[in-house]
Every structure is written in C-alpha cells, then in structure tokens.
Amino acid sequence: MKALPLPVWTLGICAIAGLVFAVPQLQPVLVYNREAIGNGELWRLLTGNLVHFSPEHVLKDVLALLVAGAMIEMRPYRHFALLCITSATLIGTALYAAETGVLIYGGLSGVAIAAVAYLCLQGATGRGAYGRVCQVVLLVLVAKIMIELSSGMQASAGFVLVPISHVVGALTALAVFAMTRAARFPLLPRSRIPGV
Amino acid sequence: MRHFVYVLLLCLVVGGCATKPQSHTATSAVEFLYPNEREPVVAPGVPVLALPLRVGIAFVPGNTGNLALTEKKKNDLLDEVANHFRKLPFVKSIEVIPSAYLRPRGSFANLEQIHTMYGVDVIALVSYDQAQFTDQGLLSLTYWTIVGAYVVKGQKNDTHTMLDTVVYDIKSRKLLFRAPGLSEVKARSTLVNMSEQLRANSEAGVAQATTDMIGNLDTQLVGFQAKVKERPEEFRVVRTEGYRGGGAVDLWLLALLGAAAGAGAWLRRK
C-alpha cells in the first residue's frame, strides 16, 4: 500500500484535540461525563478522548500521538483511522462498564498507546534492526502497562490516572493488527508482505 | 382437693401463655450524638459534599448485651454495607471504623476525631435494637414429664430486630439520610435448647435486617441524589481531583517513543 504524503488522520485528530483545549466552551459538551452518558449522550464515549485538563496534559498526549500516528501513516500500515475510532470508543465503553468511580474522563493517551502498540506490532514482525527495536519497545510498553495496572489509579495534576484506558488501547491495537494480518495472509503472496 | 388441682392446672396453662421479654438490647444514634441534651436542638450548617466522598462506617458504641453481635460479626456486617457503598460512583473510599474508636456518648467531638484520624467527610452510623420474647405454649405442659423439656418444642420464641443507618456530614453536622432495616424471626425450641435457639434467632434477625437495610439504603440514596439536585441551597456539591479521571502519557513513554522514532529514522538512512 502506498504511504500517504501527509499523516492526515494524525494531524486531524491532534488539531481537534488542540482546538477543544483552546475553546473551553466545547469541553462540557464533549467530555466523558458518566451521568450524561447514562442520560443518552453516547457521543461522549468517543469524544471524551479529545478533552484535556491542563496544557501539560494536552501537550504530552498530542505529542505521543503525533509521533506514533505520523510513523504509522508515513509507512504502509493500514487501518489507522479504524484503530483510532475503535480504540477511542472502546476506551469510553470500558470506562463506563468497569470504572464506575470515574465520573469525568478526558485524555488522548489511550489512543496514543493504541498507536504506539500498533506501530510496534507492525514493525516487530519485520526482520533486521528496526524489527528488534520495535520488539524491545513493545516489551517495555507491556511492562509499563502492567506496572500502571498494579499501581492502580494514581493522582496526577488535576485528575487521577486511569490505567484501564491504556490497557484497552493496547488490546485494540492487538485486535486491529490481528485483523490486518488475518486478512492479508491469504490474499497476498509472501513476497509482498512487508517485513517478510 | 379436686378444686385445688383444677386451679393449679389453670395457673400453669395461663402462666405458660404469659409473655415477657427475654432480652432487649439497643443502641441509639441520638444518645451518641446528643448525650447531654434532653431535647436535641440542632442548627446544622449547609453541608459541602466534596465529590468523590470519603465515607466512614461504624457501629454506634454501646453494650451488645445478649445480642449475638461479636466484634467480628460487626465487622462483617459493616463490610457488607461498605461494599455496597463502594460501588457508588461518587464514593472515593470507605473506611470501616472499629468500635474501639468510638466512645459511648462521644457526640460530634468523637466524630471530629474520626475525621482527623481517617480523613472521612461523611459517616454512616449503624445502630440496632433487638428484643426477644419467649412464650410457652400448651405443649410446655409436657415439661412436667422431664423428658418433654428435652424433646418437645414448647417454647415459642420471637425475635424483633431493627438496624438503622444514619448518614451524617461531619463538618456541618447535618443528617443526609437514613435507612432502617427490620426483621422478625419466629421459631420454636425445647426448654433445654432455648438459649441456643435464641442466639441463632438473634443472628438470623441481624442478617435479615441487614439485607433489608441495604435494600432501603438503595432507595434512600436515590432519593438523596434527587434531593441534592432539587435543593442546591441545602446541599453544596464540589468536585475534587479524585472525581476526575484522565489518560495521560508520561515522560517515559515519550522518551521511549522518541528513541524508537530516532532509531527507525537512523536505520532507514543507513
């Protein structure tokens, strides 16, 4: 598949997250609000990921997604848009189902983790030094998520960190990766599979 | 002589049907909170509920008497109620306060100490009232045979239990809501087995009243949430940090990603 000249989806998502942060009036309408979701405002499951609570929060999340997303889109890895939309929706849904104590949630980190995991999963299947780098990053990412899970919710500046969002992001990446591999293997000859 | 026997038998039958309370054990939240006032007059402030709430739960201190409520059973019961609170989205933590930390007639001064020790804003105080009655039915006549006292269930035992949870905001001293739980256990026993049966009934009564109280807590909580929304002048709600969750990328991940991106670019150039 031909790589895009510009990482359109990445830039688009990061721009929207920046806009939502810059225009505070948008935040009450878009933020994950458990009570409002219970009252039928289901779009918040998806859009909650675009809301951030501090400049540092938005900067770190956007930067991580910008790097990982751009690398995915500039390489011939497909389904990045699907990955973003699915991970964002599943993070909101998982929070609603499992984290009843979290009434308000915001942050793009779950989607960023999904992008990093997807990038490394795709790269790790390849041979050579880059494949090994991806494998190492993947291992460190898994260890980091395990540590976060065992530490539970930790206080951060203005909110508590919710580890489940990272778990769901990583699992979504794994599912999308598995789907692309399953779809690709019977269709393409071995010589055309990237990294093989 | 015949008349004397008839009168004696009549006395036995009538006496056997008489009712007297075997035991009555109770603690009172009012007595604990307002110990030195005959007519408790309170002017509570406006409670400021900082969401998510830190809640404490404890038994009102007092003598348990014959009530089959040991310290372990009290803790189990409080844990059961606490687990129910834990599921609520606006509760951050719930602490089970051991009985030893509350003094009889300790009042709000004692609750302030609990607030300092455990950092709880709201406290749920559980009080109980249990009365047991034993009646002797006609079958108790068989006790005269001595064997009957061992094998015939002539004792009719009634156990009435009430558990009551009152939830107070410690700072404003305002009652937020209350939920009672009631139970009535009826059972028969032999004369010899009576004390064992009464103890079992006492335990069963407490267990049933707990289930009833938890059900009522649900109803009262829903009502309380509606009341908070409808009457903002009576309850102020503020949201604290723990109330809000976020997903954030940390510097470790950014560094890792940067290193991976750099390595990828360098390898490509090579």
Image (cartoon, coloured by chain):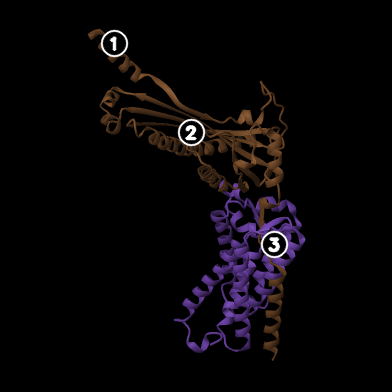
> Could you tell me residue B76's position as x and y percent?
51, 45
User: In the displayed image of the protein, which residue is found farthest to the bottom?
Assistant: B270
In the rendered structure, the residue with mark 2 lies on which chain? B
| Element type at mark 3 | helix
* Three-letter code for the amino acid on which mark 1 is drawn: Val
Answer with the quarter of the image where residue B228 lies: top right
Q: Is residue B236 in view?
A: no
| Relative horizontal placement of residue A175, taking residue B33 as reference (left or right) | left
Q: Which chain is purple?
A: A
Question: Mark 1 and 3 residues: CB-CB less than 8 Å, in contact?
Answer: no
> Could you tell me residue B29's position as x and y percent?
60, 31
In the rendered structure, the residue with mark 1 lies on which chain? B
| Element type at mark 2 | loop
* Three-letter code for the amino acid on which mark 3 is drawn: Ile
| Relative horizontal placement of residue A156, taking residue A101 as reference (left or right) | right
- Choose mark 1 or mark 2, whichever is in front: 1
Q: Which residue is mark 3?
A: A16
> Could you tell me residue B222's position as x and y percent?
56, 38
- Judge the density around disc 2: few (<14), some (14-19), many (≥20) Cα neighbours within 10 Å: some
- Choose mark 2 or mark 3, whichever is in front: 2
In the rendered structure, the residue with mark 3 lies on which chain? A
Q: Are marks 2 and 3 on the same chain?
A: no
As measured in the structure, the alpha-carbon distance from the residue carrying label 1 to the one carrying label 3 is 97 Å
Q: Are marks 1 and 2 on the same chain?
A: yes
Disc sitting over residue B66 in the figure = 2
* Three-letter code for the amino acid on which mark 2 is drawn: Asn
Q: Count how many numbered circles sit on residues in the image.
A: 3
> Could you tell me residue A104's position as x and y percent?
65, 52
